[in-house]
Image (cartoon, rainbow, N blue to C red):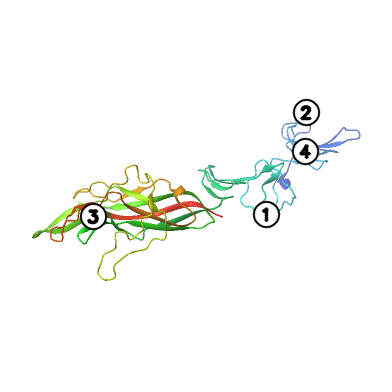
């Protein structure tokens, strides 16, 4: 740009014993609009005449006034800026805050200038308020499942119906702080076929009044007969408590299926974080209804199977690991 200059007028003033140099776009200081002015205090540029304002200047006190500075390398111990725009930032440390008793803050925006992430003295969080890490630790998610699907209702053993249960065992480390926890129950109806006299009949089964319990003693023992027998009805100790209204005040009852309408259903519990503790936790999912009569070996009842569906569940825990 400097090499392309073809016009300009240099004026020394005052004419006698000049104290400043003017470089102007006209020879008359009264008509010139573009002026470089250089005197003992510094030099500056005005695009509006001799009276300024001067938007670009270097003054004798060490100040540089400019709307734009282009540099290959700019070395400085301190750069003070209201707003800074850059393509990339290189360096060893980026320090924000600590000046005038103020905390630093880093805001990350998307291409539309919408805030997406904020890092400050409280941690790193998304704009929706979700904290990724902070004084509580790193945001983490634990999931524990019921080891696949199983009957959720009853099974017929020795001419009687016995309850079936889904169980979830979860271990929570002592450096984990829970912020939310819920159980997700997945239910599917079952299309049963059974012999009645000389014919095969069919019936739909679905789970009724399913509730969530926490076992208060983790020292339960599985009871089972070794050869050909069934699992005992009390194969878990009965030391468990219901988590009230976990699946609603009336528990979870699946939608009545039919040949034309049957579906998988997902039911999420309320937040149960207050029922969980550090160490081993065992949750039980079962019907609160009494087992129906089983009939006899020659004339079994289908009632229990009509109240049985296929179930699976998992416990989802969100919190912070310190």
Q: Secondary structure at mark 1?
A: loop
Q: Earlier in the sequence, mark 2 or mark 1?
A: 2
Task: Name the residue carrying label 2.
Answer: 30
Name the side, left or right, on which 14 lies relative to 294.
Answer: right
Q: Earlier in the sequence, mark 4 or mark 2?
A: 2
**Is the residue 20 above or below the residue 263 in the image?**
above
Residue 227, above or below 63: below
First reached walking from the N terminus: tag 1 or tag 3? 1
Asked if labels 3 and 1 touch by Cβ distance under 8 angstroms, the answer is no
Badge 3 or badge 2: first in the primary sequence: 2
Q: Disc 4 vs disc 1: which is toward the camera? A: 1
**Residue at (23%, 55%) from the top-left corner?**
190
Q: Nearer the viewer, residue 18 or 128?
A: 128
Which residue is label 3 attached to?
190
Most distant residue in the top direction: 30
Give the residue at x 38% y 53%. Answer: 240
Badge 1 is on which residue?
93
Along the viewing direction, whichever of 249 and 220 lies nearer the viewer: 220
The residue lying at 70 percent from left, 42 percent from top is 101
Which residue, as the protein is rendered here, is positioned at the far bottom? 227
Residue extending furthest right?
17
Residue 149: image x %, image y %? Answer: 31, 58
Foreground disc of the pair 1, 3? 3
SS category of the residue bearing label 2: loop
Task: Give the spatial CA distance, label 1 vs label 3.
Answer: 62 Å
Circle nearer the N terminus (4, 1)? 4
Q: Are marks 4 and 1 in contact (CB under 8 Å)?
A: no
Using the image as rendered, state which of residue 187 and residue 212 is in the foreground.
212
Image coordinates of residue 127 in percent, x first then y, are 52, 43
Q: CA distance from mark 3 to mark 4?
A: 87 Å
Badge 4 is on which residue? 44
Question: Does dot 3 land on a helix, a strand or a loop?
Answer: strand
């Amino acid at each position: 740009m400097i090499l392309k200059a073809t016009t300009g007028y240099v004026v020394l003033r005052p004419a006698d014993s000049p104290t400043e140099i003017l470089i102007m776009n006209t020879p008359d200081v009264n008509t010139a609009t573009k002026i470089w002015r250089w005197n003992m205090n510094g030099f500056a540029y005005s695009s509006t005449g001799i009276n300024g304002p001067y938007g670009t200047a270097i003054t004798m006190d060490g100040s540089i006034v400019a709307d734009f500075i282009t540099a290959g390398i700019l070395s400085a111990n301190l750069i003070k800026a209201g707003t800074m725009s850059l393509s990339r930032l290189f360096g060893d440390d980026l320090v924000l805050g600590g000046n005038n008793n103020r905390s630093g803050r880093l805001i990350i925006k998307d291409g539309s200038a919408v805030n997406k992430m904020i890092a400050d003295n409280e941690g790193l969080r998304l704009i929706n308020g979700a904290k990724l890490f902070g004084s509580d630790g790193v945001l983490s998610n634990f999931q524990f499942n019921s080891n696949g699907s199983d009957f959720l209702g009853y099974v017929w053993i020795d001419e009687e119906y016995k309850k079936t249960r889904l169980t979830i065992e979860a271990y929570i480390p002592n450096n984990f702080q829970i912020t939310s926890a819920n159980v997700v129950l997945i239910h599917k109806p079952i299309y049963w076929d059974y012999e009645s006299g000389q014919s095969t009949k069919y019936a739909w089964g679905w789970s009724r009044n399913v509730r969530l319990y926490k076992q208060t003693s983790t020292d339960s023992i599985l009871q089972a007969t070794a050869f050909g027998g069934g699992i005992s009805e009390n194969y878990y100790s009965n030391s468990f408590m219901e988590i009230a209204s976990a699946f609603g005040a009336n528990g979870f009852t699946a939608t009545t299926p039919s040949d034309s309408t049957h579906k998988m259903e997902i039911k999420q519990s309320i937040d149960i974080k207050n029922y969980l503790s550090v160490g081993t936790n065992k949750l039980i999912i079962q019907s609160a209804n009494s087992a129906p009569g089983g009939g006899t070996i020659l004339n079994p009842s289908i009632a229990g199977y009509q109240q049985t569906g296929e179930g699976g569940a998992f416990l989802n825990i969100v919190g912070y690991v310190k």
